[in-house]
Amino acid sequence: MAAPITAIRKKTLTEQEQQQQTIEQLQKELAASNAALERSLSILRELESSGMLEAAESMLKAKAEIAEIVLGQVSRKEITNLINNGMAAAGALTAVDPAQTAQLMNSVQAGLQEAARPQTEKIGFMTMLRALKDPDIQRALGFGLRFMKGLGKGLKKDTPSQH
């Protein structure tokens, strides 16, 4: 009768066998990812020929210095004010109906086109009084007056910056 197996020996690969196995695995992965690799290489060639690859490499090498400069600039009072004002403006714009904004922008564009036309007559007091009869001018003046009314009401209210 044969002797019982008391120990299982795991076959250990030599370094050369490990390298060969790694190469075979990489070959399989390269074959499976051929299209993606070709596109990646094409992008890299384009970046290299335009000088962008070198610029990106330089930026990566100088990342600590760049971060220090950026943080120094961002922490300036003017920049923090710009960021805070931008966020406040964005918040205000989210409260406005996009259709109203579009109509207002279209009206501003029409007003600019009208204003660009050459002036043919001298503007005097009587010309302005006659212009008040024009329905378009009435609409614009009414809008302006209602806008100023709302603006005045808004200025009367306490705002967080007035505390």
Image (spheres, helix red, strand yellow):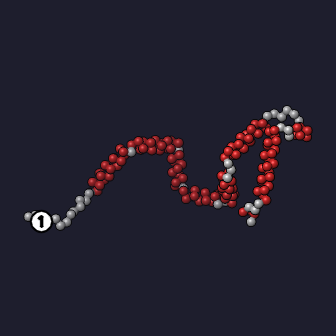
Total numbered labels placed on residues in the image: 1
Expressed as whole percent of the image width and height from the top left, the position of residue 71 reads: 61, 59
The residue most toward the bottom is 6
Residue at the spot 52% in from the left edge and 54% down from the top edge: 60
- Say if 26 sits above or below 126 in the image: below
Three-letter code for the amino acid on which mark 1 is drawn: Ala
Q: Residue at x 74, y 41 (%)?
A: 107
The quarter holding residue 163 reads bottom right
Q: Is any part of residue 82 visible from this angle?
A: no
**Snapshot quadrant of residue 83:** bottom right
Residue at the outermost left position: 1
Give the camera-side residue of 161 and 80.
161
Left or right of 39, for residue 25: left
**Position of residue 112 measured from the top left corner of the image (x, y, whole percent):** 76, 39
Eyeballing the image, is 7 above or below 73?
A: below
Q: Tell me the quarter of the picture where residue 63 sits.
A: bottom right
What is the quadrant of the N terminus in the image? Answer: bottom left
89 left or right, relative to 3: right
State the residue position of label 1: 3
Foreground residue among 102 and 68: 102
Q: Residue at horizontal 83%, vertical 37%?
A: 134
Please name whichever residue, 79 or 13, is drawn nearer the observer in this view of the structure: 79
